[in-house]
Amino acid sequence: MSSTQQALIAGGGIGGLAAALAVARAGWQVRLFERAEAFSEVGAGIQLGPNVTRILHGWGLEDELRAVAAFPDRLQVRCALSGAELGVLPLGERAIERYGAPYATIHRADMHGLLLHAVLRHGGVQLKLGERLAELADDGKAVRLSTASGKLVEGDALIGADGVRSRVRELLLRDGAPRPTGHLAYRTMLEQAVLPHGLRSDQVTAWLGPRLHVVQYPVRGGQWMNVVAIVHGRPAAELDDWDQQANAAELARAMGSTCAPLRELIRAANIATLNPQPWRLWALADRLPVGAAREMAQGLVALLGDAAHPMRPYLAQGAGMAIEDAAELGRALAIDAVDVPTRLARYALARWQRVARVQAQSRRNGGIFHATGLVRLGRNASMRLLGERLLDQPWLYGPTA
C-alpha cells in the first residue's frame, strides 16, 4: 500500500484518536479535524472491559494504562432502597485469568491523554484543531471535505468519529437527530482522601433502584472516585443554562427513597470536591441499534463510535465499542489487495452486528436496572441466586473476530 494514502478523520475524542492511531499503524497518513480549539475531556470516568484493554495492550499501551487507571477487584450490585448486596462479579486477577486482560476504570481525560500521546509518538498524524466539517463529497476516487473556515481537503477515506450529533452521519445517512432517552445522567468526581472512610471504595458498585441507578468506581489509581447517577426525567431548559446547584437539589430529591449509605454518597459530592457546584448534567440520547452494514460505511466514508452507534450507558461499553471499531478499521485499511470502498465495507460487515447487540443489550439493561414493582423484586431474587452468572459477559469480554 502506498504510504501516500490519506485518511481524514472528523472528531478528536477517544474514538477519533483511537482511529488515528490504528489507521496510522496500518501505514496510512492521517489528518484529524477537531472542532474544538484545544483538546479537552469532561471530568468523568469510563469503564474498560477486557475486550478493550486487550486492544490497548496490543497497541503497546499496557504500561501507560497501568500508570493512570484503576483495576477494581470486583463489581458489586446493591439494592438502592435497602442497601443489601444482590450480586458480585470478581474482577482483578479473575478477569485476567479468564479473558487474558484486566478490567480497568479510568478518567476520560486520562484515556484521551494516553491515546493522544500514543498518536504523537507514532507520527504520521496531523492534528487540525478548531476545524468544523461543513460538507463532504465522495466521487468514488477521492473524498473531499470543506470546513466551516473555508478549507478544502481531499483524502482517500473519511472516518466520521464526531460523536452523537455527527455531521458526517448527517451528510452520509440523513437519518435525523438522535432521540432523547428520557434519562438524565448526573456525574461527579470525588477525591477519596477527603471522603469519610466508610464511603471510600476500590471496587465498582452499582446501586439499582426504581427508575434510577447509581454507579461508583475508582479512577486515577484509586485516588479519585467517579460517581454517575441516572434518573428518569427530561431537562427543563437548555443544559448550558442549567444551574448546577439546582441540579444537585433535583438529584437529592430523586434519591429521597433510597438507603442512607447511598444518600450519604450523593451528599458527599457537595463537600468532597473543590467545585461548589460539582455535578455535571447530561440528557442521554441514543439511536436504534444498527440495522445493516451500510449504516456504518458507504463508499469512501465510514462511521465510528457514537457517530455510528450511540448507546445507553447500561453496559459501560460506549468508549469500548469505539476502540474496538478503531482496531477493526485499522485491520481493514491494512488490506492493500482490494480497493478502499471494499476495505471500509469489510470493516462495517465485521462490526455492525456486534455493536447492534451491545446497543440492544444496553437498552435492555436500562429496563432491568430501573425496574419497579414485581419486576424489581424478581430481578433482585435472580441476582441473589445467579449473581456472577448474570453479571459476567463472555460474549462481550472474550476475543472478538
Image (cartoon, helix red, strand yellow):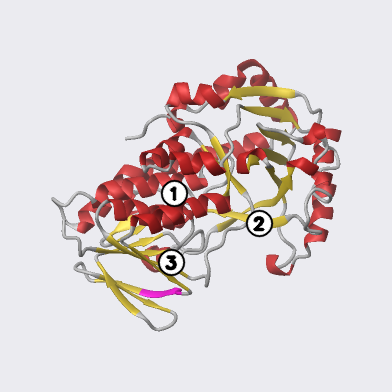
Q: Is residue 88 above or below residue 331?
A: above
Q: Residue at x 66, y 35 (%)?
A: 369
Q: Residue at x 68, y 41 (%)?
A: 223
Residue 277's x, y, as percent?
Answer: 79, 59
Q: Residue at x 80, y 48 (%)?
A: 272
Q: Which residues are magenta?
A: 131-135
Instruction: Tell us which disc is closer to us: 2 or 3.
Output: 2
Q: Which residue is mark 3?
A: 170
CA distance for labels 3 and 1: 19 Å
Q: Indicate which disc, 1 or 2, sits on the residue closer to the N terminus.
A: 2
Q: Amino acid at mark 2?
A: Trp
Mark 2 residue crowding within 10 angstroms, few (<14) / some (14–19) / many (20+): some
Residue 395's x, y, as percent?
Answer: 43, 29
Residue 55's x, y, as percent?
Answer: 39, 40
Q: Amino acid at mark 1?
A: Ala
Would you say 35 lies left or right of 391 here? left
Q: Which residue is mark 1?
A: 322
Q: Is residue 372 above or below residue 38?
A: above
